[in-house]
Image: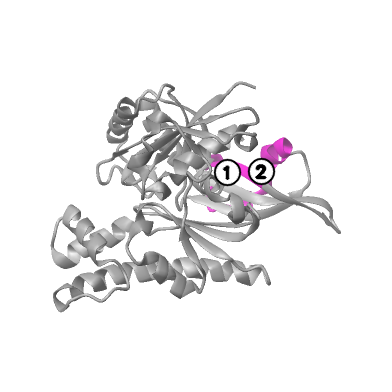
Amino acid sequence: MANTRVIGLDIGSSAVRAAELEFGAGGPNGKNPPTLVRYGEVPVPLGSVRDGEVIQPESVATALRQLWSQAKFESKDVVLGVGNQRVLVRELDLPWMPLAQIKESLPYQVGEMLPMATDDALLDFYPTAELDTSQGRQARGLLVAAQRDTVTANVLAVEAAGLHPQMVDLNAFALLRALARGDLANATAAFVDIGATITTVVIASRGVPRLVRSLPSGGQHVTNALATARSISGPEAEALKREIGIGYAVPADRQDAAEAISHVVRGLVESVRNTFVYYTGNNPGAGVDVVVLTGGGSHLPGLGQYLSSASRLPVTLGDPLAGLRTGKSARRDQLTGRESCVALPVGLAYGVAA
């Protein structure tokens, strides 16, 4: 089997990011580890992507063309990620059939479960287990239902940049593939990706996803609250946010800024913690062992300790580059300290090669 190269593309609210991985014989599980050949990111104008959905396709297409020019990706074929609150993920048991038949039958089996018409949805099924029940053999898995127009908007922006989407994948599954390796593959781990406006939570047991949630909060909401409280610009608020962090003592003249940060972060952390509580309540005796943080918002100073205190769980920063080889063009030194921001595009590349 010849080497295979795949480019994963993440369209975020603050930037577009792409990673090109090369897989040898055997793909991701082959004898030799994959190689990060190239990585690049380009900021997008504020408001051009809202909650994971492209609002201004021309602005995003321009950023993508700039990204391809700067990073010098050799292919225009990409695996595109999607994930926001208009993508529903729910556990589902169905009569056992070959996977292809299950997917074909979804529009007829899940209509009453969806908050949208099946004609307006893109449906998929991710199998996690097989069960023998009193009703016979069943397939357990995760139903994925995405609003068609959400996916279409992102695909059209990518195509406007001259790129060719080969596959659309769920960001949550990409996050899992990028990080659930080594000890994390054998634990019950919560992977929490804090983006600019969306936080994705994936709880996996021994590498198998069990719960997926998208929360409508992220690092940009913290910046916006700080900018409003201080009547300062976005860039000034971003810099001040990084200086103050969360959970640290501050002088009196910064107390208002610290309270603005705390108000948003406290709400986000409570939503994340409630997700853990919900999972534990539905899986007695199988609670979360460890929390793994990724995304730009995860770099807020003190956030890991704050979440650890609130959840009473160990929290660590995820490194999707652990175990990967790095090609000369990947400029590994520029990613030092920012490894967690690469998780989604790396995981998307893993998916198509699996």
Q: Name the quadrant containing residue 248.
A: bottom left
Residue 125 in magenta?
yes
Label 1's element?
helix
Identify the residue under disc 1.
Answer: 118
Which quarter shows the N terminus? top right
Q: Measured from the top left, where is residue 41 in percent x and y?
A: 33, 38
Asked if labels 2 and 1 touch by Cβ distance under 8 angstroms, the answer is yes
Measured from the top left, where is residue 8 in percent x and y?
47, 35
What residue appears at the point 27 percent right and 46 percent down from the top-left corner? Answer: 47
- Three-letter code, disc 2: Leu
Measured as percent of width and height from the top left, residue 92 is found at 67, 54
Query: On the rendered image, what quadrant is the C terminus found in?
Result: top right
Residue at the image point whose x is 64% and y is 34% from the top: 30
In the image, taking residue 225 as reference, residue 147 lies left or right, namely: right
From the viewer's perspective, tell me whether residue 62 is left or right of residue 116: left
Location of mark 2 (residue): 106
Within 10 Å of the Cα at label 2, are there few (<14), some (14-19), or many (20+) other Cα atoms? some
Residue 105: in magenta span: yes
Label 1 amino acid?
Thr
Reply above or below: 1 against 207. above
Mark 1 or mark 2: name the one nearer the start of the chain: 2
State how far apart marks 1 and 2 are (Cα): 9 Å
Q: Main secondary structure of the magenta part?
A: helix
Using the rendered view, name the quadrant where residue 73 is placed: top left
Return the x and y of residue 127 as percentages of the image width and height.
69, 47
Span highlighted in magenta in the image: 99-126
Residue in view at x 29 percent, y 33 percent: 63
Disc 2 element = helix
